[in-house]
Structures are given as C-alpha cells and as structure tokens.
Image (spheres, rainbow, N blue to C red):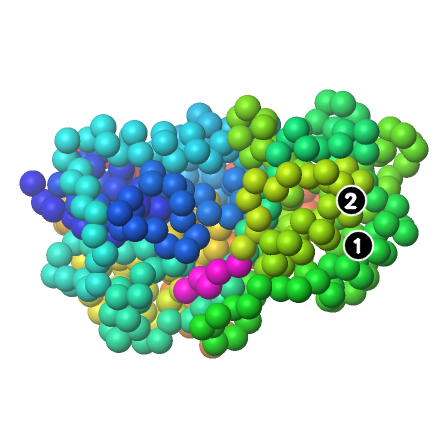
Amino acid sequence: MITVNVIGGGLAGSEACYYLAKRGYHVKLYDIKPKAFTPAHKNPNFGELVCSNSLKSGDVFGNACGLLKQELLDLGSFVLRCALETKVPAGNAWAVDRELFAQRITEGLKSFDNVEFICEDVTSIDFDQPTIVATGPLTTDGLSKFIAENFSQNLYFFDAEAPIISAESIDFDNAFICDRYGEAGSGDYVNCPIDKQGYTEFYNALITAERATLHSFESSKVFEGCMPVEVMAERGFDTLRFGPLKPAGLTDPKTGRWPFACMQLRKENESGTMYNIVGFQTNLLFKEQKRVFSMFPALKNAEFLRYGVMHRNTYLNSPGLLDDDFSVKAHPLCYFAGQITGVEGYVESIGSGLVSAISLDRKLQGKPKIDFTENTVIGALGAYVSRTNENFQPMNANYGILAPIGEMRDKKLKKQLMGERSLQKIKQITEIINEY
C-alpha cells in the first residue's frame, strides 16, 4: 500500500485525505490539533471554518462560486457533501452550522482504517515522499521557515472575522425578517435598519474607533475580499451603503420603504441561537465593537458571543513555483493545496485540495495528467496561480478568469453558457477518473 502524507486538516487537507483514502492509499494526516492551535483556531475537529460560516452563493448559472460548487459536487467532493448535510437557512447562500460541519468531516475521515492521524508540528517536507501540503494561511512558524527557504519568500495579507451575537439579544421591534427583494417575514436574514442621522453617528464612531494593534506584523496589507468594515468605511461616507449595509431590496414593514442603511444578520448555527453580522469583519478593540455596532437600534442590547478579530494570512508566490494541478514544478511528488497557494475562499480551497488529490493519484498510478482547462472554474484557478504574474494576489472564483465564450450583451445568457460548458467538461473528466 502506497503511503501519502497530507499536512494540514483544514478544508483542502480534509478533501485530499478523503479522496486518497477512498482510493486505498495509506494516508498520514498531520495536524497540530488538538494538542495545539493557531491564533485563529479553536475547534479540535478537522475542517474548521475560521471566518464566516457561509460558502457563498448556490446559484450554479449566475455566480462563479455557485458554479464551482457544482463542479466539485459532480467530481464527488466529500467536504461539500458535509456542507449540504449541515446547511442552515441563508437564502441563496450556502451557510452551515460550523460545529456540525467540522464534526461531520472528522467523523468521515475517522471512518477509514487506512488513515493514520498524527498530531505534531511538521517543520520540513520530504520531497521524495508523495505529499500534499494544505496547512492554510496560518502555517506554523517552523514549516513557514522551511517553505520560505526552499520556495522563495512568502507573501502575506491580513484577514478578519465578523462578530457573532446571541439571537436572544436582538431587538426585533427594531428589526425585520426578509430576503433581499423578498416578502417580509419569509426570509433567512434578520435586517437591522438605521436612519440617516443614526447612520451618520455610527459612521463617525466607526472611523474614529480604536483598533487592535497588529503586533509583530510588518505592514497592514489587507485582502479586498475580507476587508475590515472600518477600513472600508474610510473610503467614503456612502461606501458601506453600497456594501454590507446596502438597503436596496429590503423593505422595512414599518415604513414601506427601503431604509437609509441596513445591517444584515445571518444564522450561525442550525438551532438559530447565534447570528453573525454579515460583511462586518473587523479589527476594532472588543469594547469598541460593542460600543459602535450596538448603535444600530436592533443591537442596542446585543450580547456578543464572539468578537471579530484580525490575523495574518500567508500564501506562496505560486506563479513559477506551482503547476496548474498545484504540484511543485521542481518536486513532482509534492503538491500544495488551499489558501496557501493563493486561491482565496472556502470553496476554492476545497477545490484545490480535490484537484491535488486527483492529480497525485493519477501520477502515482502512471496515468496521464487531467487538464481541467480554463473552461472550468477550478481549472481557471489552477491556471491563475501557476501563470506568470508580477503582482500576484489571492483570487476568488469569478467569471473573469474563465476562458472567453465570445461577445454577447446578455450577461445572464453568457453565464448560463459558461456554466453549461464547464459542467460538460467536468462530466468528461468524471468519466475519465471513474475508469479505475
């Protein structure tokens, strides 16, 4: 039985481990948990979600992340199946009960007799052994040093988490339930309106509130996709009203109109006892978060179960280092997967873990490499991280990285055709993989 090392038990590592174990490999899964934790991790289970509990849109033919989910489901993604089984209501978004989600992933991995769980801090990589490194954006210092010495200097950015509040502490006299452009009382989001005067006071408090010091960090470079709300607000008075506080389509039943600005809360767990503040990643001091965010009438008595925090994320300068299947060009038995490669987002990380496992399996079996092509979202992400780029930055799933499909004015039809083309390619790939 061939032994494969998987370093890291997050989303990408869990996906890769499951795929390889199912195909009969002896998988050694290395993770520092539960003996130790990074500054952002708390749950001893595998597949822990650190920031939001949302895996974004489920719209297959209208959203690139939704299309990516379908690609991975068609390829047999274990982690996304766990997400489906632990979903909580969130409109068109895929939100999960993060505790149940991690538990389900852990149970699935531990169901294999051929998976060996090793709780230790890995500080080096044996390039002669089949290995997938999926240590995520918070790779421990020892391995980070090894990677930097062997694969050039790491890049980094700062990521932030949104606060979670108790459902019992929400003042529903000053809130209403509906989805955007939906009927009042029938949605999955709690909407917290605020008038112009209240918003002005909130805005001024937000941009002047005291922030946590980023000790030992070299700079404050922030990834656009997880920008702290206070940094976003500095771009202008109305910036939040076109972002996380967008009121469009949220009709307040008290007034019959859209509010001046509106905060949205989304269920954090299946029982609905906890809610997170959508899009409110922050680096404010804890006392400032309570003071400033409680200025919304619906949150005047809010009980904060978890405050938002900010932490450093690291990623490789992948172009020139990795191939489009996430293998290391100079060491063909070594693969990287997850956010450390420069794919940004939960689903993107899952996808890179699955592609690296599929690719390593075929390499070990002496079978031809699969070209996912830039017609698929996961293939386009692989191409993005491996293509020469002087200003390389982490990338989410989006239609801009997919191969063009021709000029057309109808954007909805264009996305539909791109989706159909992608899933047809994935179907062909699935048939090749299943020829085992």
In the image: residue 219, left or right of residue 207: left
Q: How many residues crowd mark 1 within 10 Å: few (<14), some (14–19), many (20+)?
A: some
Q: Please tell me in which quadrant of the rendered image residue 211 appears.
A: bottom right
Three-letter residue code for mark 1:
Phe
Q: How many residues crowd mark 2 within 10 Å: few (<14), some (14–19), many (20+)?
A: many
Residue 258 colored in magenta in the image: no
**In the image, what residue occupies the spot 37% across and 67% down?**
316
Badge number at residue 257: none
* Residue highlighted by disc 2: 296
Nearer to the camera, 272 or 363: 272
**In the image, what residue occupies the spot 29% across and 30% down?**
108
Q: Position of residue 188 (x, y in %)?
A: 66, 29
Q: CA distance from mark 2 to mark 1?
A: 8 Å
Regarding residue 388, the answer to whether it shows in the image is: yes
Judged from this view, the residue extending furthest toward the left is 1
Instruction: Return the disc, 2 or 1, that comes first in the chain's sequence.
Output: 1
* Disc 2 + disc 1, Cβ < 8 Å: yes
Q: Position of residue 347 (x, y in %)?
A: 46, 45
Three-letter residue code for mark 2:
Phe
Badge number at residue 202: 1
Instruction: Write down the region rendered in magenta.
Output: 310-314
**In the image, what residue occupies the spot 19% across and 42% down?**
117
